[in-house]
Image (cartoon, helix red, strand yellow):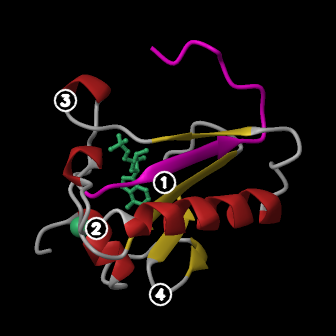
Amino acid sequence: MEDCLFCKIIAGEIPSTKVYEDEFVYAFKDINPLAPVHILVVPKNHISGADEINGENSAVVSKIFEAAAKIAKEQGIAEDGFRIVTNCGENSCQSVKHLHFHILGGKQLKADMG
Ligand code: AMP
Ligand code: ZN
């Protein structure tokens, strides 16, 4: 999609630090990490957010979670634990309108997610 930051990153038009890629999924380091490990996992096809997941496109969500499990192991955070979160819409402070899942780990995360 034109004018989408993450579509440009997936296309290689904007640089990123790639940690994983397959046919459906791209994962890269968050530019403003909130934890020692902070990775974004995104579908290669543009989906604007969690509210746009439907019967036509939802298969990629399982691909994202398969990738996330691999990434967590590779990054050494699987044993101690990690968090996967996606923001959707204004109240959640979603800033990039391309579905993305944050993987956060490498420290004790706060229980309060509000
Ligand atoms: P959200 O606020 O949930 O929409 O998350 C967007 C995330 O994208 C934020 O954590 C940003 O730090 C991250 N981000 C923005 N621009 C880039 C970029 N060029 N490369 C990597 N991460 C980015
Ligand atoms: Zn996009």
Q: Secondary structure at mark 1?
A: loop
Q: CA distance from mark 3 to mark 2?
A: 23 Å
Q: Which residue is mark 2?
A: 57
Q: Which residue is mark 1?
A: 31
Q: CA distance from mark 1 to mark 4?
A: 23 Å
Q: Residue at x 57, y 36 (%)?
A: 34
Residue 25 image offset from top left, x and y in percent: 47, 74
The amino acid type, in three-letter code, at marker 1 is: Ile
Q: Secondary structure at mark 2?
A: loop
Q: Nearer the viewer, residue 15 or 49?
A: 49
Residue 78 image offset from top left, x and y in percent: 81, 49
Does 33 appear above or below 76? Answer: above
Residue 9 image offset from top left, x and y in percent: 35, 74
The amino acid type, in three-letter code, at marker 3 is: Glu
Label 1: how many residues lie within 10 Å, few (<14), some (14-19) or many (20+)?
few
The amino acid type, in three-letter code, at marker 4 is: Glu
Label 3: how many residues lie within 10 Å, few (<14), some (14-19) or many (20+)?
few
- The residue furthest left is 2
Question: Which of the marked residues, 2 or 4, is nearer the chain's N terminus?
Answer: 4
- Mark number displayed over residue 90: 3
Extent of the magenta region: 98-114
Magenta stretch holds residue 112: yes
Q: Nearer the viewer, mark 3 or mark 1?
A: 3
Q: Which residue is mark 4?
A: 23
Question: Which of the marked residues, 4 or 3, is nearer the chain's N terminus?
Answer: 4
Q: CA distance from mark 4 to mark 3?
A: 30 Å
Label 2: how many residues lie within 10 Å, few (<14), some (14-19) or many (20+)?
few
